[in-house]
Amino acid sequence: MKLRSLRLRKAIEVTFVAVFLISIVVALGTLAMLLGSVVSTALPYLRTEVVVNYASAVNPLQAGYAAAIVGTLWVVGLTLLFSIPLGVAAGVYLEEYAPRSRLTRFLEAGVANLAGVPSVVFGLLGLALFVRILRDITGGPTVLAGALTMTILVFPYVVITTQEAVRAVPASLREGALALGATKWQAIRGQVLPAGAPGLLTAVILAASRAMGETAPLIVIGATFFQSYLPSDPRSFFVALPVQIYGYVGLPRQDFLDLNRNGILDPGEPLLASGGWPGVAAAGIVILLVILFAFNIVAMVARNRMQRRRL
C-alpha cells in the first residue's frame, strides 16, 4: 500500500514538472515569435530618422517619434517623482505605524482592490479631476495631468511592494536600534528603509514599467496622437509612445499605397515591402521596449549592488 502511494505521488510530481516545463516553453516560444515578428516588421524603419523626426500622417518614410519619446520621459519621470514618495510613505505607515484595526484592514483591502481596477477607469478619473476640475493648475490635457493620472494608477503597486519590502526586514534590526535609544522613526529611517532598499527599487521598476506602457488613460485624458513639437514643461500638451503607436496602427494602409501610386514615394524604395504604417508602429514598439529594458537594467543593477552591500 505504501509502495503504491509512493508511486502515485512520484507520478503526480513528474506530471506536474512536465506540465510546468511545457507551459514555460510554450510561453517563451510565443513571446519569441511575437518579438521576432515585431522586430522583422520594424527593421527597415529602425533608422535615425524614426527617432529624430516628428510624427507624420502623410509619409511613413518621414514619420518619427521624437515628441513621443520626450513626452514619455516627461510623464514617467513626473509619475515616479509623485508616486514613489507618496507610495513609500503610505506603505511604511500601514506596515509600521497603523494599528491593527478594522480601519487599517479596510485601507489595505482598498489599496489591493485599486491594483485590480481597469486602467481606463483611472483615465476617466484623471479626465474629470485633473483635466477639468483642476484645469487652472494642470493646464488641461498636459504632461502634468497625464503624470498625476499615472500616479494614481501606479500608487497601489508602490504601496503593496513597499509593505512587502518593509515586512521582509528582520525584526532584530528594529529592536537593536530601539535598544540603543533610537526613536521609532530613527530606526525606520536608519535601518529599515536602507535594508529594504532593494525591494523599494522593485517598486520603482513596477511603477515605471506600468506608467510607460499604458495607453487607455492617456487617450481618455486627451493626449494627442501626432505632435510636431517637443513638450518643454509640465503644462505642455504631449504625446506618449504607446499613444502614438496606437495612432500609427489606426492609420489605413491604403494611404501608403495611394502615395506609392501617385508617385510620391519611389517605387524602388526597399521600405515598401515592410507595409508602411505597420512598420512605423513596429519601430515605435521596439523603441519603447529598448527604453523600458534600459531602465529596468539600470534599476536591477542598482538593486543587486544594494543586496551585495547588505551581505
Image (cartoon, rainbow, N blue to C red):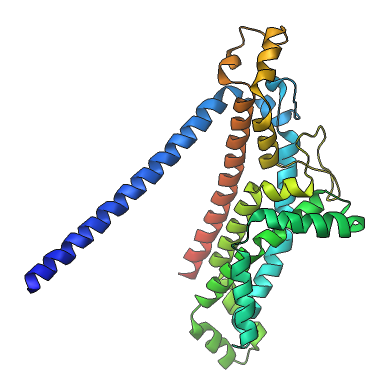
Using the image as rendered, state which of residue 132 and residue 199 is in the foreground: 132
The image quadrant that residue 115 belongs to is: bottom right
Left or right: 261 in relation to 105: right
Can residue 148 be seen at all in this image of the molecule?
Answer: no
Left or right: 84 in relation to 116: right
The image quadrant that residue 246 belongs to is: top right
Q: Position of residue 298 (x, y in %)?
A: 57, 51
User: For the view shown, which residue lies furthest in the right direction?
Assistant: 136
Can residue 296 be seen at all in this image of the molecule?
Answer: yes
- Rendered position, 261 above or below 115: above
The image quadrant that residue 131 belongs to is: bottom right
Residue at 49% of width from left, 70% of height from top? 310
Q: How many marks?
A: 0
Left or right: 264 in relation to 283: right
Q: Position of residue 122 (x, y in %)?
A: 71, 58
- Rendered position, 40 above or below 164: above
Left or right: 233 in relation to 176: right
Using the image as rendered, state which of residue 289 and residue 213 is in the foreground: 213
Residue at 71% of width from left, 29% of height from top? 64
Residue at 56% of width from left, 16% of height from top? 273
Q: Position of residue 93 (x, y in %)?
A: 65, 79
Q: Quadrant location of the N terminus? A: bottom left
Residue at 60% of width from left, 16% of height from top? 271
Q: Position of residue 105 (x, y in %)?
A: 60, 81
